[in-house]
Image (cartoon, helix red, strand yellow):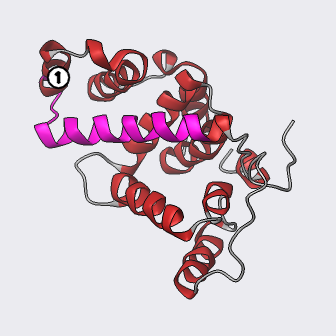
């Protein structure tokens, strides 16, 4: 069991003091989330790595996209469910609960997205993200065409693939390093 007071099982202390820009970013996290997510603390042993991570995360999850923030979080949860990533299931499950206003949807996606009452578009998106996770080399044109038929553009398919790919990477890092979710996530938006 990982020490709950450390963000990971590794002994990688945060840079101290944090550079002013990083401290400002962490202060914004506290203001908006009530905490600094442990994934950020975990990366803070190397500010360049932290900046690379946050730049990619913010671009994929918060920048303009035809995918809603909820849809991107849904992809994160489905990928994390397949990969059994405890950190991401807890953190992004809370985000799905918050953005959807539906705690049951968050739980369904964590357990098995196929039992959730999804529309055709969401189901196609999550089926594709699941296939990216379990067998990306087997994706063929009919898989992309199913997304087009559900109303997704080429740019949307790019975004779905990138969000799924990012969480496949972060799930593996979180699991391999014993990353623990912040305790606050467990009770949020239920």
> What's the magenta region?
149-173
Residue 123, image quadrant: top left
Q: Quadrant of the N terminus?
A: top right
Q: Which residue is mark 1?
A: 144
Residue 102, image quadrant: top right
Residue 104 placement, left or right of 158: right
The residue at 17%/34% (across/down) is 152
Bin the neighbour count of mark 1 within 10 Å (Cα to Cα): few under 14, some 14-19, many 20 and up. Answer: some
Relative vertical location of residue 135 with respect to residue 37 in this rendering, above or below: above
Q: Position of residue 47 (x, y in %)?
A: 55, 70
Q: Position of residue 130 (x, y in %)?
A: 40, 21
The residue at 74%/49% (across/down) is 8
Residue situated in front as seen by the camera: 156 or 103: 156
The residue at 60%/59% (across/down) is 43
Residue situated in front as seen by the camera: 1 or 82: 1
Dot 1: element: helix
Q: Main secondary structure of the magenta part?
A: helix
Residue situated in front as seen by the camera: 18 or 184: 18
Q: Position of residue 109 (x, y in %)?
A: 53, 28
Residue 13 placement, left or right of 53: right
């Amino acid at each position: 069991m990982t020490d709950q007071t450390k963000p990971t099982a590794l002994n990688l202390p945060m840079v101290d003091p944090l550079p002013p820009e990083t401290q400002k970013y962490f202060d914004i996290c506290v203001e908006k989330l009530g905490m600094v997510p442990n994934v950020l603390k975990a990366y803070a042993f190397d500010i360049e790595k932290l900046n690379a991570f946050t730049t990619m995360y913010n671009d994929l999850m918060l920048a303009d996209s035809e995918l809603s923030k909820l849809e991107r979080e849904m992809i994160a949860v489905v990928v994390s469910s397949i990969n059994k990533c405890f950190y991401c299931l807890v953190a992004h499950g809370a985000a799905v609960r918050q953005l959807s206003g539906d705690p049951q949807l968050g739980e369904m996606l964590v357990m098995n997205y196929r039992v959730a009452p999804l529309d055709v578009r969401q189901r196609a998106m999550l089926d594709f993200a699941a296939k990216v996770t379990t067998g990306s080399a087997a994706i063929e044109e009919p898989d992309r065409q199913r997304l087009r038929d559900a109303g997704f553009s080429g740019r949307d398919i790019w975004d779905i693939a990138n969000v799924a790919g990012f969480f496949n990477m972060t799930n593996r890092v979180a699991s391999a390093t014993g990353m623990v979710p912040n305790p606050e996530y467990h009770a949020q938006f239920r």
